[in-house]
Image (cartoon, rainbow, N blue to C red):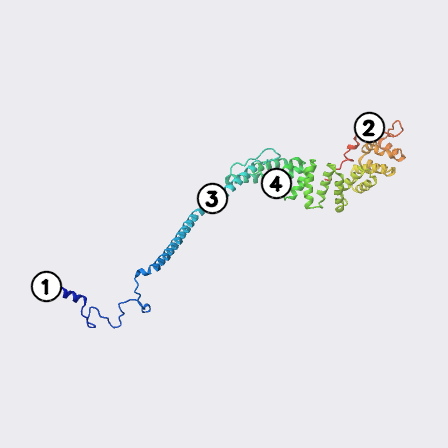
């Protein structure tokens, strides 16, 4: 046992102090040029700190916090990128739907406008308020058939109108307008026929419909103005004339018509101004001369009125011109000139026409003159009738009719 114990101890001593091996003879020998086992770079070589890892706990904690912040930032950035990608994807998917919805709304609006337009056309009267030509069906084939039908009837109406067969042309034009109510060529031709036939009331709605389609048609406005004048619609006619005069202030036809409307509406002052504008551009305008003469005669400005009548008498005068002249000179107590113009009227228009004038009280200032009595005897064959006072008394019926005589008191239009 003792021997065993010594052996063990010897062995233990040998383990604790192994014999030194000579260089190059151990388990590991460093080769030439081989770096040492310590893999730290030479630059980091320095005094070895004998402190253990527990002395570096604060530095490691700070390093861990910085790492966590970096990781959190990366996660946040990744989340934002994902959210943006998802949002963009959703928007891209919804964009075509929104565009399609907008296009669909516009298409529905166009369809609604088209339906409304068709309804308006369908409710438009075909002729003189005789009914509405309803446009049924919206297919192109149906429309093409109606357009073709309207075109055939229009061509036939034009040929008939050239031959003077206006009644047959009107029938054809009405058929064309029943097929296509807004056919402008058919409406214009029908309006022209109505105006030529004197059917002014029938021409008015056609003119209005044409201006509804295109209010810039000045020729249609002039024709409508004529129809309003001939039907005595002075109120709307004057409004239309004023609009036309804004565009062409010196248009003689419109000025004459506007002045006639003013006379009809009881505004002679404005009418006189319009007549003066006419005479500045055309001093031979019969309508303007006649209008001025009538206005001044109504104001008992006999001499001024006679000057306008004299200008009218230079041409192919009407009976009213000679009547006005004779009356003005009679009021001026110029029996000689009064009798001269009465005699000319009797020669031109016959003694019965002048005989009706002689009983007018307007000739009383010269009735007792020798010239007037001689003319009255020649024209009437008898002496003018006298009343109990010795003065010539006009016939009662003619005295009552004097203010309403169309040749002397009204303002006829130059046609």
Q: In which quarter of the image is residue 24?
A: bottom left
Q: Which of marks 2 and 3 is nearer the N terminus?
A: 3
User: Of callouts 1 and 4, which one flags the residue occurring earlier in the amino acid sequence?
Assistant: 1
Which quadrant does the C terminus fall into? Answer: top right
Q: Separation of disc 2 and disc 3 at Cα? A: 86 Å
The quadrant of the picture occupied by the N terminus is bottom left
Q: Gap between marks 3 and 4, in whole Å? A: 35 Å
Tell me where residue 293 appears, x and y as whole percent: 79, 40
Q: Which secondary structure, mark 4?
A: helix
As helix, strand or loop, the secondary structure at mark 3 comes to: helix
What residue appears at the point 54 percent right and 38 percent down from the top-left corner? 116
Label 1 with label 3: CB-CB less than 8 Å: no
Looking at the image, residue 71 sits to the left or right of residue 284; the answer is left
The mark nearer the N terminus, 2 or 4, is 4
Q: Is disc 1 in contact with disc 4, using a CB cutoff of under 8 Å? A: no
Residue under numbered circle 2 = 396
Is 159 rendered above or below residue 66? above
Q: Would you say residue 12 is visible in this rendering?
A: yes
- Secondary-structure class at tag 1: helix
Which element is circle 2 on? helix
- Of all residues, the one furthest to the top in this rendering is 388
- Image marks 2 and 3: residues in contact by CB distance under 8 Å: no
Q: In which quarter of the image is residue 197?
A: top right
């Amino acid at each position: 046992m003792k021997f065993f114990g010594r052996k063990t101890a010897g062995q233990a001593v040998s383990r604790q102090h192994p014999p030194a091996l000579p260089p190059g003879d151990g388990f590991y020998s460093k080769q030439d040029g081989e770096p040492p086992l310590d893999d730290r770079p030479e630059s980091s070589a320095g005094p070895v700190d004998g402190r253990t890892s527990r002395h570096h706990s604060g530095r490691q904690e700070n390093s861990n916090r910085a790492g966590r912040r970096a990781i959190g930032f990366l996660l946040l950035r990744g989340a934002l990128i994902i959210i943006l990608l998802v949002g963009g994807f959703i928007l891209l998917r919804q964009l075509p739907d929104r565009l399609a919805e907008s296009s669909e709304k516009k298409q529905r609006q166009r369809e609604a406008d088209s339906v409304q337009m068709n309804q308006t056309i369908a409710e438009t009267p075909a002729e003189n308020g005789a009914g509405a030509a309803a446009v049924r069906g919206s297919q192109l084939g149906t429309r093409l058939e109606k357009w073709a039908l309207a075109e055939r009837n229009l061509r036939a109406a034009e040929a008939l109108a050239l031959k003077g067969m206006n009644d047959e042309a009107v029938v054809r034009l009405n058929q064309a307008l029943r097929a296509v109510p807004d056919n402008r060529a058919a409406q214009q031709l029908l309006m022209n026929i109505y105006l030529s036939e004197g059917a002014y009331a029938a021409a008015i709605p056609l003119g209005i419909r044409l201006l509804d389609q295109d209010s810039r048609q000045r020729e249609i406005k002039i024709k409508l103005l004529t129809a309003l004048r001939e039907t005595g619609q002075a109120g709307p006619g004057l409004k239309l004339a004023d609009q036309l005069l804004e565009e062409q202030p010196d248009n003689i036809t419109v000025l004459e018509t506007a002045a006639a409307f003013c006379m009809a509406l009881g505004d002679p002052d404005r009418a006189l101004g319009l007549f003066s504008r006419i005479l500045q551009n055309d001093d031979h305008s019969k309508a303007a001369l006649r209008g001025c003469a009538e206005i001044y005669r109504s104001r008992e400005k006999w001499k001024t009125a006679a000057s306008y009548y004299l200008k009218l008498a230079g041409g192919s005068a009407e009976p009213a011109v000679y009547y006005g002249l004779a009356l003005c000179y009679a009021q001026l107590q110029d029996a000689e000139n009064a009798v001269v113009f009465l005699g000319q009227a009797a020669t031109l228009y016959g003694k019965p026409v002048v005989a009706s004038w002689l009983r007018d009280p307007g000739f009383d200032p010269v009735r007792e003159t020798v010239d007037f009595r001689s003319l009255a005897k020649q024209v009437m064959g008898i002496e003018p009738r006298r009343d109990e006072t010795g003065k010539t008394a006009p016939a009662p019926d003619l005295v009552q009719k004097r203010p309403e005589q169309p040749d002397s008191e009204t303002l006829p239009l130059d046609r």
